[in-house]
Each structure stands twice: as structure tokens, then as C-alpha cells.
């Protein structure tokens, strides 16, 4: 199942260009081009003396809301997502859980800026007001597509997100096969693990650059391909969806 952040006629993925896939939000990185929303497990390699990371999202256990010495203070407001988080921590121990709703909480502009600094990118303060909402919208899109799959399992009324992992350098089998027949590679990949009322289920998400709007070519466009991982159960769910049963 796939969803698009920009409505347009025809296929939502732009296959007219065969260049290497890159994140559509250009922040002039200082290393090889990749999506700035990188949750890869290798992040800790950049932080030999850095803060302790949560292994479930590779973000600091204590939110980094401080401004860098040469940087203006950005907003520290954090938006509560619609994504329920599977219980693993006491409320006081987990900074990414909203105390009222138990949902995941998105990073603030300042946290996002600091995260990009840690990853040796060259973020610009003025971009954060655009980049952070895009990050949040894309995550909401992914969760909406996961819920469509989860409705096939009526025994669990409230699936929850347990953890997520970035695997940008590990293309999915589907992405590799598509590339072999001429389609573009995704610019990022995430694996999300869902708690289905006590059962852990993994989903694979490929992120593609969508077609640009001719009337607004600078506006980012995304296409996400969300489906269950290729396990026995996941393959059966894909088959049921394909056959409409």
C-alpha cells in the first residue's frame, strides 16, 4: 500500500530522471547526500562521547533543547503525534511520550537542528520551520497506511508503534527489483515495529521523491510505499490485499 503527499495525475513517482536518489529537501550536507531524517542505528558512531541514545528511535534519552553558541534559539515546542506508543517506560523516564495521550511526540525545531548538527550536516535555522512539519506529515502518512493494513486483523483494536529504525543504506528487496527494471531507488527506508496487542509485527517503508507540481516546483513531494515485512504472515497479508480477500 502506498500513499502520496501530493495529488497529481498518473503515477506519483517521477521516473523521468535516473539520477541517484536524494532527499528532496536540500540542506547542502557536508557528506554524501542522504535524507536529513536519518534514524539509522549507526548514528551512535557519530557520538562516542555524546548523550545516551534510546535504542528504539536513536534519539537522546534527554531532549536536547539548548541552542548552539553560534546559533539563534529555535522553537522548543513539540507536536504530539497521532501515533500511540507501546508501553516500555515509566512516564518520567521517556521524554518522547506525551503524558496525556501516551502518543509519540515529534522533535522540536531546536531538537531537529541539534540532531542534524550531531550527524555532521550543515543545517540552517530558517529551514527548520519547513523541515520539521514535513518530517511530521510524512510520519503521519506512514502510520495511516500501517493502520490500513492493521484493519485486516480485527482482533486488535489499537495497534501501537513499538520502535522504528532507519535503513537508508539497506534497500528493500522490492526496491532492488524495481531498480533492476528501470525505476528509481527510494531515498530512504524505515522499518517500523508495531505492537499488535502483544504481537510484534514489522513493516517496511520506502520513501520516494514524487512528481513536482509545475505550478510550485519548489514544493517537496513524497511518495511512501508501506507494506508488511516479507514474513509468512506478511506475505499472506500482501496476497489478501492484492486479491481483495
Image: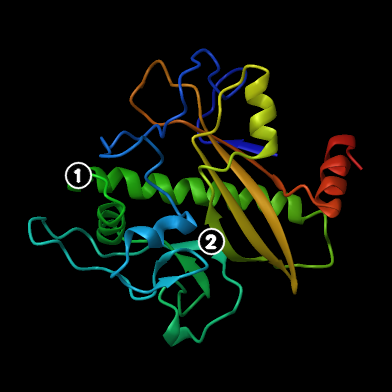
Kindly check if marks 2 and 1 are in contact, taking CB atoms under 8 A apart as contact.
no
Residue drawn at point x = 60 percent, y = 52 percent: 191
Who is closer to the viewer here, 147 or 18? 18
**Residue 82's mark?**
2
- First of labels 2, 1 by sequence position: 2
Q: Position of residue 141 (x, y in %)?
A: 56, 46
**Residue 124: which disc?**
1
Please tell me how crowded label 1 is: few (under 14), some (14-19), or many (20+) other residues with Cα within 10 Å: few
From the viewer's side, name the closer residue of 94 and 181. 181
Residue at (75%, 50%) from the top-left corner? 149
> Against 79, is 4 above or below?
above
Which disc is residue 226 wearing?
A: none
Residue found farthest to the top: 16
Residue 193 image offset from top left, x and y in percent = 64, 61
- Residue 151, percent across and down? 78, 55
Q: Is residue 244 left or right of residue 37?
A: right
Note whether 135 is above or below 158 in the view shown.
above
Q: Position of residue 82 (x, y in %)?
A: 53, 61
Give the alpha-carbon distance from disc 2 to disc 1, as whole Å. Answer: 28 Å
Q: Quadrant of residue 220?
A: top left
Amino acid at each position: 500500500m502506498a500513499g502520496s503527499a501530493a495529488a497529481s495525475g498518473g503515477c506519483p513517482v517521477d521516473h523521468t530522471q535516473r539520477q541517484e536518489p536524494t532527499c528532496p529537501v536540500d540542506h547542502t550536507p557536508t557528506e554524501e547526500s542522504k535524507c536529513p531524517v536519518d534514524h539509522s542505528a549507526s548514528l551512535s558512531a557519530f557520538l562516542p562521547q555524546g548523550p545516551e541514545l534510546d535504542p528504539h528511535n536513536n534519539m537522546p534519552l534527554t531532549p536536547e533543547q539548548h541552542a548552539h553558541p553560534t546559533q539563534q534559539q529555535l522553537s522548543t515546542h513539540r507536536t504530539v503525534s497521532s501515533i500511540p506508543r507501546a508501553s516500555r517506560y515509566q512516564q518520567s523516564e521517556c521524554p518522547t511520550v506525551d503524558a496525556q495521550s501516551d502518543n509519540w511526540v515529534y522533535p522540536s525545531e531546536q531538537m531537529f537542528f541539534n540532531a542534524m548538527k550531531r550527524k555532521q550536516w550543515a543545517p540552517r535555522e530558517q529551514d527548520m520551520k519547513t523541515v520539521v512539519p514535513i518530517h511530521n506529515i510524512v510520519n503521519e502518512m506512514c502510520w495511516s497506511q500501517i493502520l490500513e493494513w492493521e484493519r485486516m486483523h480485527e482482533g486488535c483494536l489499537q495497534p501501537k508503534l513499538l520502535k522504528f529504525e532507519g535503513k537508508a543504506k539497506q534497500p528493500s528487496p522490492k526496491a532492488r527489483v524495481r531498480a533492476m527494471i528501470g525505476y528509481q531507488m527510494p531515498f530512504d527506508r524505515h522499518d517500523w515495529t508495531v505492537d499488535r496487542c502483544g504481537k510484534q509485527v514489522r513493516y517496511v517503508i520506502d520513501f520516494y521523491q514524487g512528481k513536482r507540481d509545475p505550478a510550485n516546483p519548489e514544493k517537496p513531494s513524497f511518495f511512501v510505499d508501506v507494506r508488511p515485512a516479507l514474513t509468512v504472515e506478511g506475505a499472506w497479508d500482501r496476497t489478501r490485499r492484492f486479491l481483495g480477500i
